[in-house]
């Protein structure tokens, strides 16, 4: 099936992080999963959407324009956006919570990836808003951390994330597909996941794994 015909909804039914990572590997892009312990904290199993980036910094002075850029970012989200909070792994505060999740969802955002800490996990879980983060921190971000730029390339765990890149997250991890190679990566991932189904059925039917790999070339 041509990649142009594979919609985000179709990806959510068939694809997962490992098979997308394998497709990237096959194209020589072997460093597209951040080396960061990003975990699903709100009970969500899968998140596939497009990066909406925010760059965060720690601060030790009074913020003259509290929450200015983060509110601009969440209010201008589009359908299928995933809010990316690149905070260099800081746990100075919980930079994402229930209110930002509510505002972002109202604009079409479908989840958040936070390279830092969050709070209000129970409330975000109750509202079924997908959030991947490093952990939790009770402190509010006011006068502790702030967004310093939006819609720019950011880095998380050694991986560059650009606006509109495709992002796939599940319980195994997070993987980023650059827009310039998305067409080919998704085509390869789609073909592999269906080839894996054939291999799995053969092994379930009694075929030895080595024989299945020799026959189908997928494992």
Image (cartoon, rainbow, N blue to C red):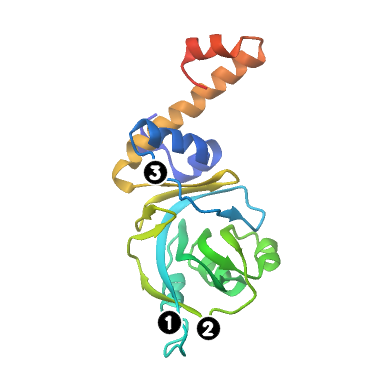
Which of the marked residues, 2 or 3, is nearer the chain's N terminus?
3
- The percent position of residue 23, horizontal first and vertical second, equals 41, 33
Could you say whether the residue bearing mark 1 is in a helix, strand or loop?
A: helix
Residue drawn at the location 66% of the way across and 70% of the way down = 120
> Could you say whether the residue bearing mark 2 is in a helix, strand or loop?
loop
Image disc number at residue 68: 1
Image height of 151 relative to 44, above or below: below
Which numbered circle lies on residue 31?
3
- Residue 15 visible in this rendered orientation of the protein: no
Give the distance between the C-alpha atoms of the residues marked 2 and 1, in whole angstroms: 11 Å
Residue 156 at what x, y percent from top left? 43, 57
Q: Residue 24, position in %: x, y?
A: 39, 37
What residue is at 61 percent from the left and 17 percent from the top? Answer: 201
Residue 142 has which mark?
2
Q: Is residue 202 left or right of residue 6?
A: right
Q: x%, y% of residue 105? A: 54, 65
Q: Which of these two is toward me, 137 or 185? A: 137
Q: Quadrant of residue 75?
A: bottom left
């Amino acid at each position: 099936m041509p990649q142009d015909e594979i919609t985000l909804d179709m990806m959510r039914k068939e694809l997962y992080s490992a098979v997308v990572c394998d497709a990237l590997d096959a194209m020589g892009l072997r460093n597209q999963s951040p080396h960061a312990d990003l975990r699903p904290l709100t009970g969500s199993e899968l998140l596939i959407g497009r990066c909406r980036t925010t760059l965060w910094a720690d601060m030790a002075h009074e913020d003259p324009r509290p929450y200015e850029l983060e509110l601009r970012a969440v209010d201008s989200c589009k359908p299928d956006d995933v809010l990316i909070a690149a905070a260099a792994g800081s746990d100075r505060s919980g930079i994402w919570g229930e209110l930002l999740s509510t505002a972002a969802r109202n604009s079409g955002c479908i989840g958040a990836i936070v390279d830092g800490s969050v709070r209000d996990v129970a409330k975000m879980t109750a509202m079924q808003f997908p959030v991947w983060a490093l952990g939790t921190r009770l402190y509010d971000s006011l006068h502790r951390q702030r967004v310093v730029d939006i819609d720019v390339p950011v880095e998380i765990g050694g991986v560059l994330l650009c606006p509109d890149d495709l992002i796939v997250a599940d319980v195994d991890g997070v993987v980023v597909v650059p827009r310039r190679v998305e067409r080919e990566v998704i085509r390869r991932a789609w073909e592999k996941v269906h080839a894996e189904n054939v291999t799995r059925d053969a092994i379930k039917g009694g075929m030895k794994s080595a024989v299945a790999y020799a026959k189908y070339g997928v494992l």
